[in-house]
């Protein structure tokens, strides 16, 4: 399931970029509404409140997408390193066995 955005980009990185763009646009809208409020345009209160809510929602979207992208990057890095990202209990048991054997071979020391 690939999502296409402007410029032909697909996937979670494109969604993250779109989310960041949305966040930036809403932040600019909030800044403009705040400036109009300072200039005495009280009818901008509704717009400012809406912009704050939209900004909060956009921020949550951006953070969620960043988390997803980071998770996917870790999965890809694990797969590229030859791992599946899952624990290999057999390999862990073998390593523990090797280390215990070395300790036994080293003697009691005490």
Image (tube, helix red, strand yellow):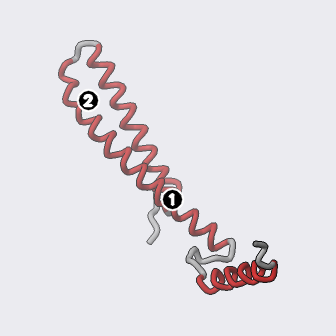
Residue for badge 2: 48
Identify the secondary structure beneath mark 1.
helix
Residue at point 50% right, 63% down? 11
Mark 1, Cα crowd under 10 Å, few <14 / some 14-19 / many 20+, is some
Residue for badge 1: 69
Vertical placement of residue 78 versus 39, above or below: below
Say whether disc 1 or disc 2 marks the residue closer to the N-terminus.
Answer: 2
Is 99 in front, or is 62? 99
Residue at point 48% right, 53% down? 66
Q: Position of residue 1 (x, y in %)?
A: 44, 72
Mark 2, Cα crowd under 10 Å, few <14 / some 14-19 / many 20+, is many
Q: Position of residue 17 (x, y in %)?
A: 49, 50
Furthest residue in direction front, as rendered: 110
Q: Position of residue 77 (x, y in %)?
A: 63, 67
Is 110 in front, or is 55? 110
Q: Is residue 27 left or right of residue 68?
A: left
Q: Is residue 92 left or right of residue 98?
A: left
């Amino acid at each position: 399931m690939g999502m296409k955005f402007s410029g032909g980009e697909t996937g979670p990185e494109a969604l993250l970029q779109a989310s960041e763009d949305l966040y930036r646009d809403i932040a600019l809208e909030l800044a403009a509404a705040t400036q109009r409020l300072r200039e005495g345009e009280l009818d901008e209160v509704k717009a400012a409140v809406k912009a704050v809510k939209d900004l909060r929602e956009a921020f949550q979207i951006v953070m969620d997408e960043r988390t997803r992208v980071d998770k996917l990057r870790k999965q890809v890095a694990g797969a590229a390193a030859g791992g599946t990202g899952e624990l290999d209990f057999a390999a862990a048991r073998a390593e523990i066995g090797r280390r215990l054997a070395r300790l036994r071979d080293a003697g009691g020391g005490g």
